[in-house]
Amino acid sequence: MRRIVLAALFLAPMPALSADLAPAPVEPIVPVTPFSWTGFYVGAHIGYGWGREKDDLSRSAPVPADSFNVDGVLGGLHAGYNEQFSNNIVVGLEGDIDLSSIKGSHTVIDAQNGNSRLHMTNRWQGSVRARLGYAFDRILVYATSGVAFGDIRERWNLFDGDVVGSSTKTKVGWTVGGGVEYAFTDNWIGRVEVRYTDFGKSRFRVAPDTRFKAGFHETVALVGISYKF
């Protein structure tokens, strides 16, 4: 009899203990929202450009130049808008404007009048371009092409420093390239881009009896940072 009473007293609290050991509530799983490239953005960039000046000076004067290398640093601002579609395709429009130090020169050999030098300088350039890319969440791989514009200054001077003459033209050409962007945060985006640009040719007059056509093309490698609104 005593054993039956002790067993009853031992088992009596078990329902309450079972209630105290109820499973803890499960925290809900919050889904991760994928990054969206849609929106306006502004930014800055810097890079290095290299290419060639091409002219027909040898056909308009008794001294040849024809072609020489140009290079330099450039940098500026860009702004644009992207629209991302459900299949990860990103379409956008972007414009940029740069200050440029791209330049080069070539020795003009003249046995009668003495040697001189032809200089080409690009002081500014810009473009308006369409962009088409594919987004891997926060990584965007894109191609870009559009209209490019910039100045070309041709200057002819003697080796003693005297300037024979100079002429400056604003040219409109075309540009094409591609790049990769990465969104570090929802607002800050880094980029690497490479573009080829051809500014075409214009007629220059650097002396009363010296007229010729000249232009230049370049390849530019850029790095930049953008802020997306």
Image (cartoon, rainbow, N blue to C red):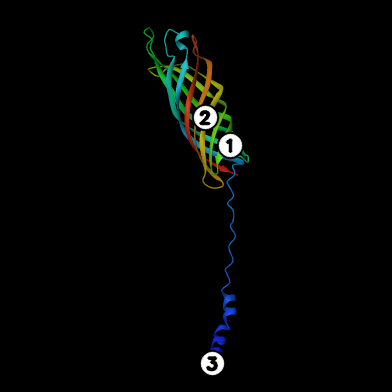
The amino acid pointed to by label 2 is: Gly
Please give the name of the residue rendered at 54% of the width and 32% of the height, measured from the top-left corner. 143
Q: Earlier in the sequence, mark 1 or mark 3?
A: 3
Q: How many marks?
A: 3
Please give the name of the residue rendered at 47% of the width and 27% of the height, measured from the top-left corner. 219
Q: Where does label 2 land, which residue?
A: 177
Q: Quadrant of the N terminus?
A: bottom right
Q: Earlier in the sequence, mark 2 or mark 3?
A: 3
Q: Quote the CA–CA distance across marks 2 and 3.
A: 94 Å
The amino acid pointed to by label 3 is: Arg
Frontmost residue, 38 versus 224: 38
Q: Quadrant of the C terminus?
A: top right
The amino acid pointed to by label 1 is: Ala
Q: Where does label 3 land, which residue?
A: 2
Circle nearer the viewer, 2 or 1: 2
For residue 66, side relative to residue 135 (left or right): left
Residue 83 position within the rendered picture, expressed as x and y whole percent measured from the top left: 62, 38
Residue 137 position within the rendered picture, expressed as x and y whole percent measured from the top left: 55, 44
Say which quarter of the image contains residue 118. top left
* Labelled disc at residue 79: 1
Frontmost residue, 39 versus 136: 136
